[in-house]
Image (cartoon, rainbow, N blue to C red):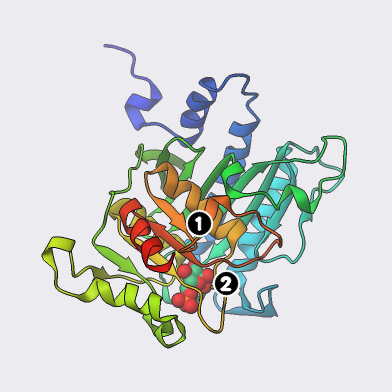
Amino acid sequence: MSESTLAEIYGWTLERHILEQQRTVEGATGEFTKLFQQLALAGKIIASRVNQAGLVDVLGVTGETNVQGEQVQKLDEFANQALIRVLEAGGQVCLMASEEVEDPIPIPTKFPRGKYVLMFDPLDGSSNIDVNISIGTIFSVHQRVTDSDAEPALSDCLQPGYKQVAAGYIIYGSSTMFVYTTGQSVHGFTLDPTVGEFFLSHPNIQMPKRGKIYSVNEGNAAKWSDDVRAWVDDFKISDEDRGRPYSGRYIGTLVADFHRTLLKGGIFGYPADNKNPNGKLRLLYEGAPMAMIAKAAGGDASTGTQKILDITPTELHQRVPLYIGSADDVAEVERVLG
Ligand code: P6P
């Protein structure tokens, strides 16, 4: 009997997949593989707690508010600490940034520093925790730009999205999935909790060139510009030649709305409005990583007038209007808003 490899018996684990990818990268040092092992571990830790949320006293709020002025749900803080504690000790990063923390997070001097900068939203969609709707972790990886013997600085975080070396998310839903890209392709791994491993379930995800779903919070319509309202209303007309009407779907968790868009196509939008001139979503750890994933899957991401990946950030928590999804759908909104 031919000797089956682990991959044939059980499929590709995330670790095995990264190692295989690593082998194709000239001069790869294995640091990247270790970084992803740590991200996967943090994801498993968070998933275990999220899945108990209904049973253990982790529901509800801590009574504190984060830098966004939002109530911090207990799971938010748990996820934030899980990522910080695992990654700071891992030796692959020199600086981190989190939606939950005002300033960049230095690595304690007792730990070795690596060449990567990690920025994340530890638990996106936390307002949905208590109603058992999918939530997620979003991460963005850059290489530091400061000298390796210098102190890491804010400039290591404030890099344009096209310079990301990797981006991904972990979605805690009906199953826990780890989705990532290093720029060329997008791969999805599903956690088998009985084994404690992420296995390749969605190799080389390609986003349809055009979709049939639009995803936007129409409760904000009164605050939008006339152009944005016209863009949304256009999805509801009956015009078979233009594939209208689209279906409306809105979960209220970026990771979940984006994951559906990635797999099924269409467009997600969080427009600017007269109360939030730059929209609500954050560039560094929401818009830019999702834009890298969309691009690698054949989709696109824009503010309506500028590609998300081309924006050079000026602030750690800066917001950005976000239209992301199928290439043709994003091109259409750029024509309307451009
Ligand atoms: P709204 C969740 O709070 C979040 O940051 C994103 O995950 C989500 O896409 C958006 O806000 C939802 O915002 O205003 O529609 O509730």
- Which residue is located at x 33 percent, y 77 percent? 230
**Which residue, as the protein is rendered here, is positioned at the far left?**
240
Where's the N terminus, which quadrant? top left
Placement of 319 over or under 12, stated as above or below: below
Mark 1 burial class by Cα count in 10 Å: few <14, some 14-19, many 20+: many
Placement of 36 over or under 176, stated as above or below: above
For this rendering, which residue is in front, 332 or 327? 332
- Which residue is located at x 53 percent, y 65 percent? 124
In the rendering, at what x and y percent does residue 338 appear?
A: 44, 64
Q: Is residue 75 left or right of residue 335?
A: right
Residue 179: assigned label: none
| Sequence-earlier tag: 2 or 1 | 1
Residue topped by disc 2 = 278
Looking at the rendered image, the disc whose residue lies closer to the viewer, 2 or 1, is: 2
Instruction: Answer yes or no: is residue 130 visible.
Output: no
Q: Is residue 96 left or right of residue 163?
A: right
In the rendering, at what x and y percent does residue 31 appear?
A: 65, 31
Instruction: Answer yes or no: is residue 230 visible.
Output: yes
Placement of 291 over or under 186, stated as above or below: below
Indicate the secondary structure of the residue bearing disc 2.
loop
Residue topped by disc 1 = 47
- Which residue is located at x 40 percent, y 81 percent? 226
For this rendering, which residue is in front, 133 or 299? 299
